[in-house]
């Protein structure tokens, strides 16, 4: 459907995801009613090797930016980066009040403290299980379990339509920190009627259930009892429940815990502020340095091999205060986010070479997902009995698995959206009515660029095909060539005999080709430059079978 065709009826309810569909992360969801909009979550995603030089992806808010005055508010469902991590960069394009429950709000405040306009953001704290009228939307927060405390689903009532937007969740009957899902409210909601369920697809392809955080305690304790030397544990810094599992096992084996990494200390600090963890066994890095090996557990960031995090530095033996070696144990208590596998494997290899025993979720029950597997998704359908399902939060295959579950469970309607898909929701059905612009953005160090920006495309080409820079100095008289200089990146070993020979050969080829230009062509700089490019490109194509980027620079001697 053409993007120009979308017409929004003032009184109709629409759902438009601007991020989070077809690609993991960078969630941004919009709901429309009565001429106004409500946004849910504004997160970031990780870029992979397809986008060299780019670490972070953001949703593109330009569709809603154009009607900023109609955006009534932004709700953040929980403090994971794929839901909260875009607020600091993108709020200037949204300029609306931001709603969140207390723990999530504290995490957001700390982020905004570092932004120049942080103080301008109107923040409205909602109590857990609270309600708020945001423009024409009546919203209600429902407690859910997830791998970070204080996670909520949102019930949205717009006119006569009720939507249940799940955010991230799983059924954890016994979380170590925070609340489990409010199943009583979900059951009640099912009786009231849900016209659309917009839900988490992450693990919709995984059979069974995700499990409970408290089930991990036994294996942690077993490992801690067996360990003779230092123990390292790496986890996602926001996984406060997991941190408590580690703290408990440490206390039971008379070990102290040292937190290493800024984001981990920050999250633990918030958790302490909300009285969620027991900090009596936590030591600073200085204090930890005085303990013997069998008395300490280092909890570290860097489970994904991120260069700036702590564990990769420990693995390389470059960390200023923490070292792991022969007789020590490192527990990987996190999953690998797709795209990070290479960095993680390298890190594990480095640790193993140093004599560290590396323990992964494959060998022991030391990690569970915070997203619902198939049986949990089916249980959710059973509780809230939705008339329609819109699978979001995941790659296409995950969304499709979610949609298939809905179909198998005889949910009457389902639509699998892409970013930008416009879904009209009524009491009777849902309907795809169009598509709006919704590309991802790249947060490129200090700039925000479209993901298909020429600079990123060129970088990719550079990294695959290399570059040749040619500078030619010529005079005005026909075929007066004073100098040709050539240097390359990613193509040759210019120091080697072969490299020198090839460079000379190309310079020769360019010189020969320039001699074929007519006087008229010779006087035209653009034509001479084009000849240089074509000549160089042809050489590399015939010789190496690749097409490097050729930068040709012509200097004309004015004498
Ligand atoms: Zn999450
Ligand atoms: Zn998420």
Image (cartoon, rainbow, N blue to C red):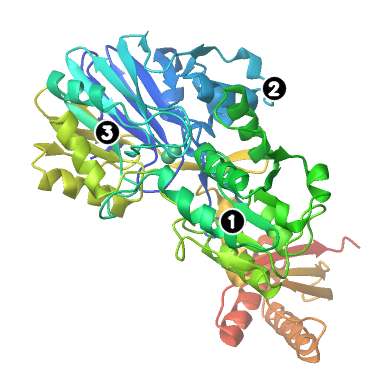
Residue ID for mark 2: 116
- SS for callout 2: loop
Front in this rendered view, residue 275 or 403: 275
Q: Is residue 82 above or below residue 355?
A: above
Front in this rendered view, residue 240 or 346: 240
Give residue 4's quadrant in the image.
Answer: top left
Taking the spot 60% from the left edge, 50% from the top edge, the residue there is 54
- SS for callout 3: strand
Q: Is residue 301 above or below residue 147?
A: below
Q: Which part of the image, by quadrant, shows the C terminus? A: bottom right
Question: In the picture provided, is 556 more to the left or to the right than 183?
Answer: right
Residue ID for mark 3: 198
**Label 2 to label 1, Cα distance in Å?**
45 Å
Percent coordinates x, y for residue 15 in the rendering: 28, 28
Whether residue 471 appears in this view of the structure is: yes
Query: Badge 1: few (under 14), some or many (20 or more) residues near its Cα, within 10 Å?
Result: many
**Label 1 to label 3, Cα distance in Å?**
41 Å
Percent coordinates x, y for residue 418 in the rendering: 31, 43
Front in this rendered view, residue 148 or 67: 148
Give the mark nearer the N terminus: 1 vs 3.
Answer: 3
Query: In the orientation shown, which residue stands out farthest toward the right?
Result: 559
Q: Which of marks 1 and 3 is in front?
A: 1
């Amino acid at each position: 459907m053409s993007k120009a065709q979308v017409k929004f009826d003032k009184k109709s309810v629409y759902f438009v995801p601007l991020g989070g569909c077809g690609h993991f992360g960078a969630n941004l969801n919009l709901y429309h009613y009565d001429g106004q909009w409500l946004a849910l979550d504004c997160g970031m995603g990780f870029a992979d090797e397809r986008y060299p030089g780019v670490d972070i992806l953001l949703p593109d808010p330009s569709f809603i930016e154009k009607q900023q005055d109609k955006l009534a508010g932004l709700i953040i469902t929980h403090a994971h980066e794929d839901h909260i991590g875009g607020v600091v960069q993108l709020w200037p394009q949204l300029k609306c009040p931001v709603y969140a429950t207390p723990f999530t709000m504290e995490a957001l405040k700390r982020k905004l403290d570092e932004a120049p306009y942080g103080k301008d953001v109107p923040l409205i704290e909602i109590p857990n299980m609270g309600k708020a009228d945001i423009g024409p939307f009546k919203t209600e927060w429902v407690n859910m379990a997830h791998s970070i405390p204080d996670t909520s689903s949102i019930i949205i009532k717009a006119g006569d339509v009720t939507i249940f937007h799940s955010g991230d969740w799983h059924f954890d009957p016994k979380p170590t920190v925070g609340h489990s899902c409010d199943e009583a409210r979900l059951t009640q909601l099912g009786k009231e009627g849900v016209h659309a369920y917009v839900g988490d697809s992450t693990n919709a392809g995984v059979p069974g259930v995700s499990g409970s955080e408290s089930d991990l305690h036994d294996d942690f304790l077993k490992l801690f009892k067996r360990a003779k030397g230092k123990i390292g544990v790496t986890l996602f810094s926001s996984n406060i429940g997991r941190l408590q599992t580690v703290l408990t096992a440490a206390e039971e084996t008379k070990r102290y815990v040292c937190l290493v990494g800024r984001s981990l200390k920050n999250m633990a600090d918030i958790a302490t502020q909300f009285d969620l963890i027991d900090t009596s066994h936590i030591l600073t890095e200085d204090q930890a340095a005085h303990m013997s090996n069998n008395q300490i557990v280092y909890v570290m960031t860097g489970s994904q091999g991120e260069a700036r995090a702590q564990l990769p530095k420990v693995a390389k033996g470059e960390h200023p205060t923490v070292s792991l070696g022969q007789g020590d144990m490192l527990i990987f208590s996190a999953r690998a986010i797709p795209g990070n596998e290479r960095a993680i494997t390298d890190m594990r290899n480095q640790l193993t070479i140093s004599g560290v025993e590396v323990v992964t979720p494959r060998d022991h029950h030391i990690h569970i997902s915070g997203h619902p597997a198939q049986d949990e998704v089916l249980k959710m359908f059973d509780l809230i009995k939705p008339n329609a399902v819109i699978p979001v939060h995941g790659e296409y295959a995950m969304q499709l698995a979610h949609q298939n579950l809905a179909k198998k469970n005889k949910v009457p309607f389902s639509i699998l959206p892409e970013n930008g898909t416009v879904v009209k929701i009524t009491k009777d059905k849902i309907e795809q009515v169009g598509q709006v612009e919704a590309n991802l953005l790249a947060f490129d160090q200090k700039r925000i660029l479209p993901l298909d920006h020429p600079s990123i495309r060129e970088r990719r080409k550079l990294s695959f095909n290399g570059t040749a820079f040619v500078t030619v100095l010529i005079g005005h008289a026909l075929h007066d060539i004073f100098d040709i200089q050539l240097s390359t990146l990613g193509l040759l070993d210019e120091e080697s005999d072969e490299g020198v020979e090839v460079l000379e050969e190309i310079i020769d080829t360019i010189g020969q080709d320039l001699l074929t230009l007519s006087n008229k062509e010779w006087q035209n700089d653009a034509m001479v430059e084009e000849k240089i490019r074509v000549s160089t490109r042809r050489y590399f194509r015939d010789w190496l079978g690749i097409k490097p980027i050729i930068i040709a620079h012509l200097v004309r001697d004015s004498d």
